Amino acid sequence: MKRVAGCDEVAETASAMEVGNYADDDVRRPAIIRYRARCLETRLTQEEKQCVFEAEDTSSIAWCAPRFWPQETIEVVATTDCAMIASQIGDRMTTMPKGQPAWDIGQRQLSAVKQSCEQDRWTVQVGACARGIPIAAYIIPYCAHLAPMGLRMKLEDRIATASK
């Protein structure tokens, strides 16, 4: 069962990023207190708390909750650019035979990619990578490594759902 994150879990994760997992308690304790207070002050949503708790690096924390981790800025794709990115991918997908099951799945995947771009705060690196992929489903093997963990998980879920 997935552990539900609260501000205590957020503070544990953030302090580990700052001082390390194996730091002595007297070193970690002040960081934990500071990050717990910041979590409460910034009123993170449950989704943000869960994302920060599951983050593997500081860039992922900054992507999950920018107001909680202001010391690092993550550039995101403007939602107005998402239609163009999807169009560029779609233009390359024209070699797929229309009316075939693969075409239908490809169109659903393309729609999922566009929706993810619009709703999941794509990083500029993911957007740049996506502009060059030949098929929407390729965003996972080609570009997911560039995404913060939370974004990667959302992308994978959307593509998997669209592929059914």
Image (tube, rainbow, N blue to C red):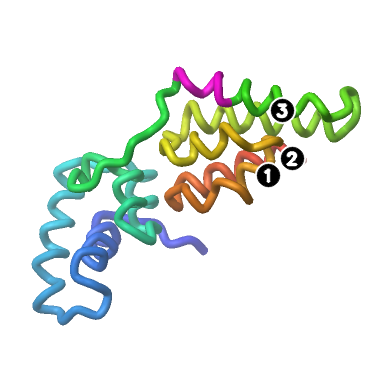
Kindly indicate whether the residue at mark 2 contacts the one at mark 1 (C-beta within 8 angstroms).
yes
Residue 26: image location, x then y, percent: 9, 78
Q: Residues within 10 Å of mark 1 (few under 14, many from 20)?
A: few
From the image, tell me which residue sits under label 3: 92
Residue 54: image location, x then y, percent: 40, 58
- Which numbered disc flags the more N-terminal residue, 1 or 3? 3
Q: CA distance from mark 3 to mark 2?
A: 18 Å
- Which numbered disc flags the more N-terminal residue, 3 or 2? 3
Q: Mark 3: which amino acid?
A: Arg
State the extent of the magenta-drawn residues as a range: 80-85
Q: CA distance from mark 1 to mark 3?
A: 21 Å
Q: Helix, strand, or loop for circle 2?
A: loop
Q: Is residue 81 magenta?
A: yes
Q: Mark 2: which amino acid?
A: Ser
Would residue 78 appear left or right of 18 to someone viewing this image? Answer: right
Residue 20: image location, x then y, percent: 24, 72
Residue 124: image location, x then y, percent: 42, 36
Q: Mark 1: which amino acid?
A: Ala
From the image, tell me which residue sits under label 1: 160
